[in-house]
Amino acid sequence: MSDKRYQLAIIGAGPAGIAAAVECYLLGMRDIILIEKDENHNATIRKFYKDKKRVDKDWQGQTVELDGNILFLDGTKESTLDFFDEILEKHSVELKTHTEVQKIVKEADHFEVMIAGGSVLAQHVVVTIGRMGKPNKPDYKIPGPIKKQVVFTLDSCSENEKVMVVGGGDSAVEYAVELCDKNDVTICYRRENFRRANPTNQADIAKALEKKCVRALMGVDILGLEEDNGRVKVLLSEGENESYDRVVYAIGGTTPSAFLNGS
């Protein structure tokens, strides 16, 4: 444990965490630390937004009135990340990455933020970790030999693969549409339509299906996975089982309730 006591520790370095840091800095706070479990700030945008994806302040006629000191502008994934880089540099906020907070303990006149191998002391703590703590995983076992081919983002995907995307929300649809230009893509969803996706993504997947760039298995459950000569065999509730080079799950995320309840 370091003897240094920060004036403010913020858990989570997404847009909310960075905004909180800036607002507190402008109010006169110094010694502010942002603690992030991933390798950089805005991990959700980095991992789950496709390249060049629009990141807009307003959406579908819903106007967002900005009440703080960060002038958020419409842009892309890349320009938004650059924007937050500039904000952190300008306001001298310390960013501690690759650090997962295990628990927050209230002491007499400060908080002790417990991390692996030590702790961080702070007079005040703000938690801005969002709703999705970790991506949901299927409730059936993933065999060891194929674990590297079963993924939850597009980070390790390459070209000329036969890929199954599992899910029917925005992420699943965006993954399928992005991959289909250079891969043989099937999207598998347990419901009969893509109603959960936003209108733009519904239009994109409809276009991809019409052009036969993506094949859809709708109203079908996955019962399990098996190793099949170095490929991933997908066992379906109905229809013919097939093998794929890669399976990408985009089935939502779990709220970090255990962490919140224990702090």
Image (tube, grey):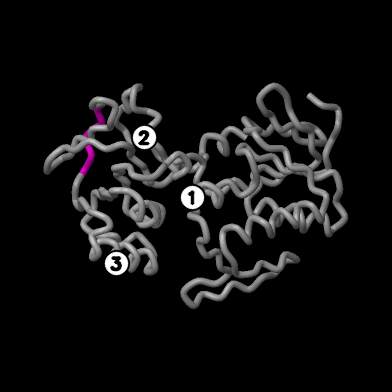
- Circle 3 SS class: helix
Residue at screen point 38% across, 46% down: 250
C-alpha span from label 1 to label 2: 16 Å
In the visual, does 2 lie left or right of 218? Answer: right
User: What segment carries the magenta color?
Assistant: 221-226
Which residue corresponds to mark 3?
207
Residue 224 sits inside the magenta stretch: yes
Pointer 1 residue = 48
- Tell me the residue at 74%/42% (across/down): 95
Tags 2 and 3 touching, CB below 8 Å: no
Under tag 1, what secondary structure?
helix
Q: SS for tag 2?
A: strand
The stretch drawn in magenta includes residue 228: no
Q: For this view, does 90 lie left or right of residue 63?
A: right
Label 1 or label 2, whichever comes before in sequence order: 1
Count of all numbered marks drawn on residues in the image: 3
Please give the residue where the numbered disc 2 appears in the rendered image: 150
Residue at x 75% of width, y 66% of height: 69
Q: Amino acid at mark 1?
A: Phe
Examine the residues drawn in magenta and state their main secondary structure. strand
